[in-house]
Image: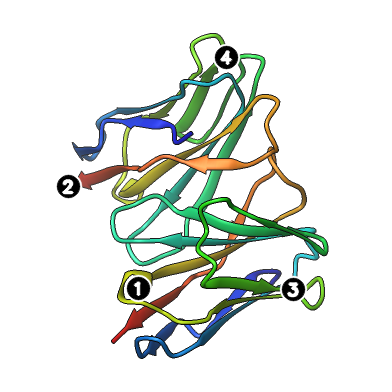
Amino acid sequence: QQPVQSPQAVILREGEDAVINCSSSKALYSVHWYRQKHGEAPVFLMILLKGGEQKGHDKISASFNEKKQQSSLYLTASQLSYSGTYFCGTEVSGGYQKVTFGIGTKLQVIP
Amino acid sequence: DAMVIQNPRYQVTQFGKPVTLSCSQTLNHNVMYWYQQKSSQAPKLLFHYYDKDFNNEADTPDNFQSRRPNTSFCFLDIRSPGLGDAAMYLCATSRGRGSYEQYFGPGTRLTVT
């Protein structure tokens, strides 16, 4: 079951904040976040496990609301280097440990 | 540096002509994945190996096969490529399945003429 990401695309000016959402119709065990720059491989950002945890490093953080089966990725004071497509991947509870990726959110940071 | 390597980076093949893509890793990870990614789409899992245990996705066409002769190497064979198989093919590894970080290779861009 592919997670749903929103928005599909967003344009920011440097220094602005953004939130990317990821939701599932199934109970989740974990949520993964990756960033992919054009023509490159996806790069791991973070994993959140059920239990409603939050994580973050530098100006990128994420939360996982297990009850709502949702995760949000927060980008604070965006930099040009944040541009790319952000994918969430979800692992369903009680499933067979497979991560299914959403369609992605294309983020462009402009000067 | 430990990494995931894919060869070739670009592959052009003819319609129906078999092609093999390769992936190697120096991370000594148990799990190796193959994803197909078409333009502006999510990576789609084709199959994965957990050690020598092969796991095929239900919707992966029979045209796609894989081999993992040892821990370090994994191959994707496309027996009779069609125009619809043109895509980026990504190999990834992880220490375990599920809640483990996946390390992606740079991908092989396959063109079918």
Mark 2 sits on what residue?
A111
Q: How many marks?
A: 4
Mark 1 sits on what residue?
B86
The crowding category of the residue bearing disc 2, from other C-alpha atoms within 10 Å (few below 14, some 14 to 19, many at least 20), is few
Mark 3 sits on what residue?
B68
Residue A69, position as x, y percentages in the image: 51, 17
Mark 4 sits on what residue?
A66
Q: Element type at marker 3?
A: loop
Q: Amino acid at mark 2?
A: Pro
Q: Are marks 2 and 1 on the same chain?
A: no
Residue at 44% from the left image edge and 36% from the top image edge: A2
Above or below residue B79? Residue A105 is above
Q: Amino acid at mark 4?
A: Glu
Residue positioned most to the top: A67
Q: Is residue A84 left or right of residue B55?
A: left
Disc with the residue nearer the chain's start (4 vs 2)? 4
Q: Are marks 4 and 1 on the same chain?
A: no
Residue at 36% from the left image edge and 43% from the top image edge: A103
Q: Amino acid at mark 3?
A: Arg
Q: Are marks 3 and 4 on the same chain?
A: no
Label 3 vs label 4, nearer the camera: 3
- The chain under label 4 reads A
Give the distance between the C-alpha atoms of the residues marked 2 and 1, in whole angstroms: 35 Å
Residue B3, position as x, y percentages in the image: 66, 69
Label 2 vs label 1, nearer the camera: 1
Q: Are marks 1 and 3 in contact (CB under 8 Å)?
A: no
In the picture, the disc for residue B16 is: none
